[in-house]
Image: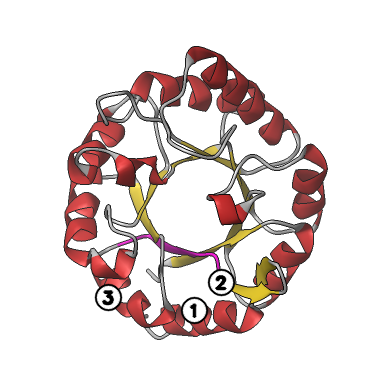
Amino acid sequence: MTALLEIAVTSDLAAALAQAHGADRVELCTALELGGVTPSQAAIEATVETGAQTHVLVRCRAGDFVYDDDEVRLMCREAADVVRAGAAGVVIGALDAAGELDLAAIERMADAARSARSDVSVTVHRAIDASADPVRSAARAAASAVRATRILTSGGRPSAGDAVDVITRMVAAAGAVQVMAGGGVTVDAIPRLTAAGVAAVHLSAKRRERDHWSLDPAIVAAARAALDATR
């Protein structure tokens, strides 16, 4: 099966462009230049209205992924709210002070999302790349009560294309949980990543425009072509 193409977007306009040029789904966030945080309800609703399958990042602040209980409670509320706003999936994650996945916090967020709709898709985000051992973390996430649909990872490296060996081991460790390669993904790296067994690739497909980033539809189209060529 051909791996799916997910594009990170920050607006409904970018989501529509991504979809028109071959994206299978989008991950919506805001402040992409900071690694992304939870977008507004209006942005979620507008993006859902484009018809794009919309997964939404739930992250209350930039910075590290070690959250106190107040932050986790806030993200639980956000997780439920984004699903009520129409999101098909949530993108969540957390670490503990020892650098391991905070599975208790992640499970709380996943449960909150499912309280709004039971069939919501759950992605454990790249907090896993900041964990002590991404391969071990993938196995722990897969075996946990989080019931994750997928794991988004760069294999612990700045660029997923430089961590194909690690991602291959993460695919094996995750079992039935999908692994999606994301983080510094280039079009040229797509064949190597799909050969590693990933279920999807995730790109921001961005270009610099004055003082901000915007979606480059040519990159989306090139990524779609690269994925189609792997069939």
- Rounded to the nearest angstrom, the CA distance separating label 2 from label 1 is 9 Å
What's drawn in magenta, residue-wise? Answer: 198-205
- Rounded to the nearest angstrom, the CA distance separating label 3 from label 1 is 13 Å
Q: Which of 228 and 131 is in front in this view?
A: 131
Instruction: Assess whether mark 1 and mark 2 are in contact (beta carbons under 8 angstroms).
Output: yes
**Left or right, 54 with reference to 63:** right
- Mark 2 vs mark 1: in front: 2
User: Which residue is label 2 attached to?
Assistant: 205
Seen at 67% across and 49% down, the residue is 30
Please tell me whether mark 3 sits on a helix, a strand or a loop: helix
User: Which residue is label 3 attached to?
Assistant: 192
Which of the two labelled residues, at mark 2 and mark 1, occupies the earlier sequence position? 2
Please tell me whether mark 2 sits on a helix, a strand or a loop: loop
Query: In this view, which residue lies farthest toward the top?
Result: 69
- Rounded to the nearest angstrom, the CA distance separating label 3 from label 2 is 18 Å
Instruction: Assess whether mark 2 and mark 3 are in contact (beta carbons under 8 angstroms).
Output: no
